Image (spheres, rainbow, N blue to C red):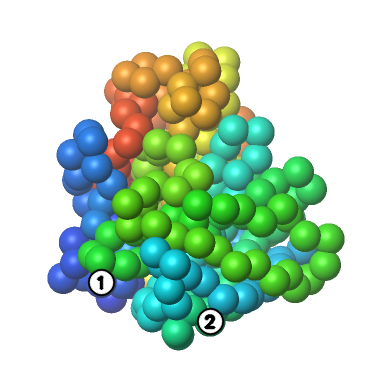
Amino acid sequence: MARAGLSGVVHRTLTLVIALALLAACSSGSRSTSPPRTVTSTTAAGADRVIVRGSATLDGRPFDSRWVGAVAMRSGLVTPCQFALTPVTHGDYAVAVLGEGEASGCGAPGARIALWTYAGDKIVYSTNTLEWPSTRTAEFAPRYSSATPAGVVPALAQFNGGVFEGGVEVPLGTKVEAFVGSTRCGVASVRSDGDFTGYILDVVGPESIPSCTRGAPIAFRVNGKTATPTNVTNTPPGVRDSVDLMVQ
């Protein structure tokens, strides 16, 4: 099973504040109210990692928050890509965002970065995005709105867990994908921060990619190999309890 310490498993309840993003059950019409955990690098290189910094506003005003994170959006897909969760202090923040070289689905030319923060006991995504920069640092002024917490990010079905082949944990950096039929609807990599080793995967719906049908079966692949379970469906918006992936 995926290992969980104080920082726990994705998206637990508020009593486990550092828990992994996206795990606690939520209703089909709402997002989880607990903050995503750190999403760490799969390698030490970080050659294409970028630092995004600037001044953020919530409902038009600077604010304080314990966390800011990032997702990369490209070709309709959405992937969690912050290196570590960092604070917002009177609007000022800085967050390291992983590139494709460190984590599948993360930053690359053509991608856009959306940031999220934790405010009012819920996750709030930015209403604007930053084009993936060609430099190692970039200035960005994210705008958040309490009235539109989803911001620019489409509805997502969210999964996390351990990944095993032949009963053994797969190496860090192993690609994890989610398909609906022949259409790829989610991509991520196996990552670790010491407390958790596994995958964190966002699966989009038809609003983002038409063939990513809501309610359709999801076929998971690990480095291109079919993985179980095979009875999981695409249900954005929403989160699932931990789903460990197995390859024979």
Furthest residue toward right:
134
What residue lies at 70% left-to-right and 71% top-to-bottom? 139
- Where, by quadrant of the figure, is residue 82 drawn? bottom right
Amino acid marked by disc 2 = Asp
Name the side, left or right, on which 221 lies relative to 135.
left
- Where, by quadrant of the figure, is residue 219 drawn? top left
Q: Is residue 235 visible?
A: yes
What residue lies at 32% left-to-right and 29% top-to-bottom? 235
Residue 92 has which mark? 2
Mark 2 Cα shell of 10 Å, populated few (<14), some (14-19), many (≥20)? some
Circle 1 residue? 17
Residue 48: image x %, image y %? 77, 63
In the image, 240 versus 213, the foreground residue is 213
In the image, 20 versus 43, the foreground residue is 20
Residue 93: image x %, image y %? 54, 79
Name the side, left or right, on which 125 lies relative to 53.
left
Residue 213: image x %, image y %? 42, 18
Residue 247: image x %, image y %? 47, 35
Q: CA distance from mark 1 to mark 2?
A: 22 Å
Q: Compare marks 1 and 2 and give the one earlier in the sequence.
A: 1
Amino acid marked by disc 1 = Val
